[in-house]
Image (spheres, grey):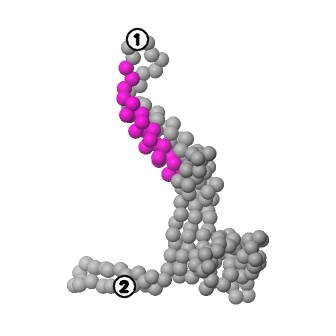
Amino acid sequence: MRCCAVLLAATACTHHQPARTLLPETPSTKAVVELGNGRQVEVRATPTPDGLRWVAQDTGAPGFGKVIDAADIRGYTTFHHVRGLFEGAAVAGLTGIAIGATVGYASGDDKCASWCIFEFTAREKAGIGALFLGSLGVVLGGALGAVAGSRDFHQLDTAPRLTATVAPGHAGGALSWRF
């Protein structure tokens, strides 16, 4: 069971997305918002008279069906299970290829003294190990990645971004920023 927990944690990818606003972008999006007091609430993007807003969906929490004020939100997380499948398959597959090739090559050439069923060179064993463990990694990583999902964490981008730019043909440089 520990092995599965480690693989599940390893295949879950989180992407941090700076946002100008913490209002939902598309209707029916499910998310988990983190409020200013540190509490997390399951929400769904719902059209309201004021536009698209987050509405609490956690039936066990007080305020079920309540519109969450964007000013109270510290950030929100959305989950994408199909993208998680591909990310998990890629990460675990490449890891399996690397480990299989390394172990196969490190075991060296087979040397049979009298009688053998199979006799492989280190290079052949590296290929077989990479193929076997890479395939196993793709299957397990894809399955675990699909279950865990890929996460997008949206956080208000309050820090100004400063970018120094030097353009060819111009003396000096330019400094630009965005808020």
Q: At x 46% / y 35%, what residue is drawn?
A: 129
Please name the residue that numbered disc 2 is placed on. 176
Q: CA distance from mark 2 to mark 1?
A: 75 Å
Q: Nearer the viewer, residue 51 or 149?
A: 149
> Which amino acid is tagged 1?
Ser
Q: Quadrant of residue 21?
A: bottom right
Q: Is residue 88 visible?
A: no
Q: Characterize the local packing of mark 2: few (<14), some (14-19) or many (20 or more) Cα atoms within 10 angstroms.
A: few
Looking at the image, tell me whether mark 2 or mark 1 is earlier in sequence order: 1
- Determine whether 79 is above or below 57 in the image: above
Q: Quadrant of residue 139?
A: top right
Residue 175 at x, y percent in the picture: 33, 85
Q: Is residue 106 visible?
A: yes
Q: Residue furthest left?
A: 171
Q: Secondary structure at mark 1?
A: loop
Q: Quadrant of residue 63?
A: bottom right
Question: Which mark is on residue 114?
Answer: 1
Residue 116 at x, y percent in the picture: 45, 16
Q: Secondary structure at mark 2?
A: strand
Residue 88 at x, y percent in the picture: 55, 53
Left or right of 106 in this view: 152: right
Q: At x 28% / y 79%, what residue is drawn?
A: 166
Main secondary structure found in the magenta portion: helix
Q: At x 50% / y 51%, what residue is drawn?
A: 91
Q: Are marks 2 and 1 in contact (CB under 8 Å)?
A: no
Residue 141 at x, y percent in the picture: 56, 49
Magenta region includes residue 103: yes
Left or right of 112 in this view: 18: right
- Determine whether 9 is above or below 109 in the image: below
